[in-house]
Image (cartoon, coloured by chain):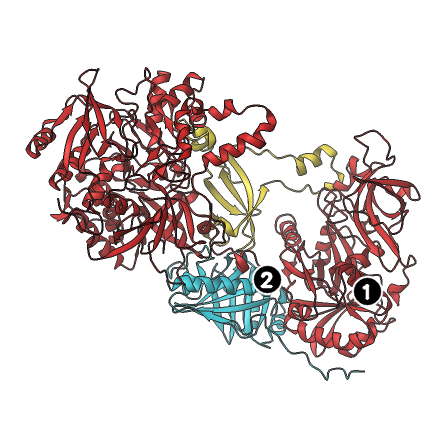
Amino acid sequence: MVDSGADLANRTSPLSGFHGGSSTVRLEAAPPAERISLRCRAEDVAALSSALGVDLPVRPKTSASANGRSALWLGPDEWLVIAEENGGLMQAAKNSGALHSATDVSHRNTAILVSGRGAAAAINAGCPQDLSLKVFPVGACSRTVFGKVEIVLLRTGEDAFRVEVWRSFSDYAFGLLAEGAQDAAV
Amino acid sequence: MLLIHCPYCEEDRSELEFRWAGEAHIARPENIAAISDEEFAEYFFLRNNEKGLTYERWRHIHGCGRFFNAARDTVSDRFLTTYKAGMPKQLLPETGASEKTVETYEATEGDAR
Amino acid sequence: MSASSNSGTFRIKGAGRLTPARTARFTFDGKSYTALEGDTVASALLAHGVHLLGRSFKYHRPRGILSAGPEEPNALIDVSRDAARRQPNVRATVQEVFDGAKIASQNRWPSLKFDVGAINNLFSPFFAAGFYYKTFMWPREAWVKIYEPFIRRAAGLGVAPTEEDPDHYANRYAHCDVLIAGAGVAGLTAALSAAATGQSVFLVDEQPEVGGALHYDTATTIDGQNGYDWAQAIAAKLKAMPNVTVLTRTTVFGYYNHGFLGLVERVTDHVAKPAKSAPRERLWQVRAKKVVLATGSIERHMVFANNDRPGIMLASAARTFLNHHGVAVGRQVGVYTAHDSAYEAAFDLKRAGVSIAAIVDCRPDPGEALLAQARALGISVLSGHSVTDTGGRLRISSMTVARNGGGDARRIAVDSLIVSAGWTPSVHLFSQSRGKLRFDGVNQRFLPDIYAQNCVSVGSCNGTDDLAELIDEAIAAGGGSVTLAGENRFEWTGGMIGAAEGAGPDTTVKAFVDFQHDVTAKDIRLAVREGMHSIEHIKRFTTNGMASDQGKLSNMHGLAIAAEMLDRPIPQVGLTTFRAPYTPVTYGTLVGHSRGELFDPARKTPMHALEAAEGAEFEDVGNWKRAWYYPRRGEDMLAAVNRECRTVREVAGVFNGSTLGKIEVVGPDAAQFLNLLYTNAWDSLKPGKSRYGIMTREDGFVYDDGVVGRLAEDRFHVTTTTGGAPRVLHHMEDYLQTEFPHLRVWLTSTTEQWAVIAVQGPKAREIIQPFVDGVDISNEAFPHMSVAECSVMGVPARLFRVSFTGELGYEINVPADYGPAVWRAIWERAAPIGACLYGTETMHVLRAEKGYIIVGQDTDGTVTPDDAGLGWAVSSKKSDFVGIRGLKRPDLVREGRKQLVGLLTKDPALVLEEGGQIVADPNQARPMTMLGHVTSAYWSENCGRSIALALVAGGRARIGETLHVPLKDRTIEVEVTDMVFFDKQGGRING
């Protein structure tokens, strides 16, 4: 018999080893992260914000970051909260004592970091949203479409985005980003 | 491609982010188990499919995920308003547009003034 | 006249804007030519005196270059770089020459100068409008064998390439405040004005450089500057502004709803050696808050006898070739016009040293200003005259000129004839935006009237002829304040639509209206005589305006001729609708990135690479790639599946269930919500237990199924079918958000959070035991349908005791990134025990042996839970659930509905075909009464015979009956049975 626990499983990221881009766009797989899909009613936002240490944004298309955690507004009662690996998000939400739903989606999503002056153009190869800084400023986030897949897009800098995508769609997303990056450099 | 104002995201977004979800303001009967066959048919099967001003549901499925209601002129494809699910039907005057200016797309042919 | 030696003898020194030193070599039908950089294929060939470019569509008449722009109906060519990079039906007037281009003429055989198809011209009485509606009516068989192949061959314009397109194409979504279509004087002015306000501006023009009409119109100055130079300076200024995007070589081909426009940018078609990274074309999908249409207008040809010979072209085209490309279209040029603008072309040519044979003006009094200028240049003007015929075979050699009303006819030798019937405003995009037009009777043209979108037309597309007025209009449209002063030499007037003198209803001459489809004035009249009174019918009967140029030149003439025949005013006859695309768009552009691996996402599970390494064959399930079976050396599919089926029941099998849809249902009202969405009752399910659930739609039919595990009072792990996951979540969200919003529950898709490793078979427990911590998985402590949150290989896991095989089974859910490690460890332990990996095919067979249904295979959207033998899963205690009322509908409760049953063939070796129809009496008359059909059929190695599931009318009452499945060549006898073929007592699952 195998000694239980002796052989701990290790992680295999869906995009490990992926990198690419062009002279104006850099593409890289984001490091593994912890993520929860957080749902709650308006009256419980304050309690959960304080428990998580980050103010859950209540305005559409906005995000907030604090204490190594980012909270992305996805819908009127829905946030994607991202932290570094083993960030204790589920427990923190539980500690709020408030009515909520937290579901671990750390492994459901993976993320691609897109940066460089052609970043917005590369994403616009497949994303129909207006990514001008006026309409999609730094910190803005949105669930949207990218080619034939759904993504969550977060602008982390003037020329930097984080593309969250379900893992089985990630090589498609990376491939389309690579083509977009190439075109953004033409 | 339509541009649709999501009442939750408070922004116009491409139709690509949305999914149409049928006629609006058809409430599921509370006593559904007890209704007659005719009432069930009226609730579940029969739709008006009106030309001109229609009330319909959309879901911002690749955005905030919310269902909402829209008043749209099916002739001009213009959205007159969109509003959150659960809100009462937003009554609007019949639009002039659908009355005369444009008939169906095919019928506009040969109809220059 | 002196000509540049190698770029063509018709090149005029000092004329045009091209640089003589910058040349490019290309071939036309195999012969090599030198062009100048900036030439189109048309201008380059004309520079060498080549006018004959192709044969017409129906009559195979020699055709040349009619225009200098996208409206070109005749000069369609085949452009290639190599065998695969080849495109037919390119307009020679648009294609820029690049070094090494291989150009070929089309629609001719065996050669351009001797074309066998030209015999069609002699038989033209048989090819009158509507000929194919009448000529090829019968016999019926002749359609397939004779008529259609003949028509297809005769009708072919270009020939499609046969090799895969090696180029790539790009897509870009963009947004702007103002999009301006057309960068002539009006568009540039509007752009300047809009840009000054700080708005984001897209200025788009189809030509390589901005300028529009300023390409040929050298008489216009703006702010004291030559118009074309002014345009380039303004473009440079605009390009330098951060809020302005200037796109040249870009066509706005479609103006759709809500300010959405389709643009195609030709990125490399003009480049000799395109960079590998550059797309050939880029599709821009632009959402504009406001659109300014500055699309200009298109000159019309004159409709007269034999008006299609090579060498006959629009006056403005000749002017473009001269003033922009530095090419004379002939040495002895005739002019035939109903409009002032042709005079300016004649004056320019004359000043460049070209002899003008005469200006034939069908108007009695062209006006003194023009006549004086003509006199000064020594050009004779025949006003009140018309060109009634032309001569020449492969190129015009003469024009026959007669006084209007007849008489005084004479032939004048010409090698080129330039024509103008006036100008047609380009209202295509306006019309596409669903704007409504009005008829300007004075100037015989349609103009924008009622706007359907936030859009404004400026300049000549709006009928604004006066330059100062045009500038004011464009400035206003841009919304900013700029000042400009424009000046031009003449105020143009005149124009006509319809057939000219000598091509009227009393004649039988070939006066072409639509060059590309060979539609003559006579054809249009014939259509009216045949009873076509609507312009839509006339259009389809004659195919006028239905060629790839979409009637840019022909629509107005056709309309006028029809109106005359119908004796109705033009606005009453109406105009056909302009549709996108404005000019043809390649498939490559529309496909964009969606090819090869990006055609559609290929969803792979975390264990995909490991499955592939074990030799798995994959099948597509939706977008998923699922391991289908694992053939070993020498095994075919059946052998592999038989081995897998046997091994699972004898030892164990390991299966990848990761694609199974998963939804986390969380909240204090979770059970209540599931009560409403599933037919089953969930209150009684205790945490740590799971249950098979059936979901119906409101109509009572089975929508999905799956195992639901209760992890806590307020947390359920719901599974769905692989294909049903997004649809089921959407369905649940719909009810939750719009019918039951009071419930405190939330739904999250977790399909991809978990890698699912199913271990099934008598040795399943022995295999997984060492990896599991935190739960006692003994049969007593963890019986069938148990669920637990535990740890597997140190990883937080959800363990289900569940079976889709009828064997002792577990499904291990671990966070997806850990899937490969856990899979590898389990397989390393399972393999030496004698277990196997199995795929979806074995899964299908094993579940069928147990009579477990697959929603979507054994059900088809008209099957109730009871029909499927799952009536037990419908709670009778609940007062409400989705489907409760639908299930009571009379048709759903009647006797004799189709029910799922088992079928056993009398010959156990025969495997039925899925979809096979079932009848009671195979000898009955056709059409036979169908009782149902086979939904699943397999060879069952474990049963040693074939098995099948079927939907059969009154099926359960027929158990024991013999029925028949008639096939094309034989009829198979079957016995109706219950649905369980293996381990009928069901003891193995509790092993």
In the picture, which chain is red?
C
- Residue A119's disc is none
What residue lies at 18% left-to-right and 39% top-to-bottom?
C467
What residue lies at 89% left-to-right and 57% top-to-bottom?
C944
Is residue C695 visible in the rendered structure shown here?
Answer: yes
In the picture, which chain is cyan?
A
What residue sits right under mark 1 in the picture? C643
Seen in the image, is C489 located left or right of residue C743?
Answer: left
How many other residues sit within 10 Å of disc 1, few (<14), some (14-19) or many (≥20)?
many
Q: CA distance from mark 1 to mark 2?
A: 51 Å
Asked whether C60 or C461 is in front, the reply is C60
How many other residues sit within 10 Å of disc 2, few (<14), some (14-19) or many (≥20)?
many
Q: Is residue C206 above or below residue B46?
A: below
- Residue A40's disc is 2
> Which quadrant of the rendered structure holds the C terminus of chain C?
bottom right
In the picture, which chain is yellow?
B
Give the percent coordinates (x, y) of residue C388.
Answer: 25, 22
Q: Is residue C18 above or below residue C469?
A: below
Q: Is residue A14 above or below residue C495?
A: below
SS assignment at label 2: loop
Asked whether A43 or C101 is in front, the reply is C101
What residue lies at 45% left-to-right and 17% top-to-bottom?
C531
Is residue B88 visible in the rendered structure shown here?
Answer: no
Label 1: chain?
C
Residue type pointed to by label 1: Arg
Residue type pointed to by label 2: Cys
The tally of labels here is 2
Q: Quadrant of residue C971?
A: top right
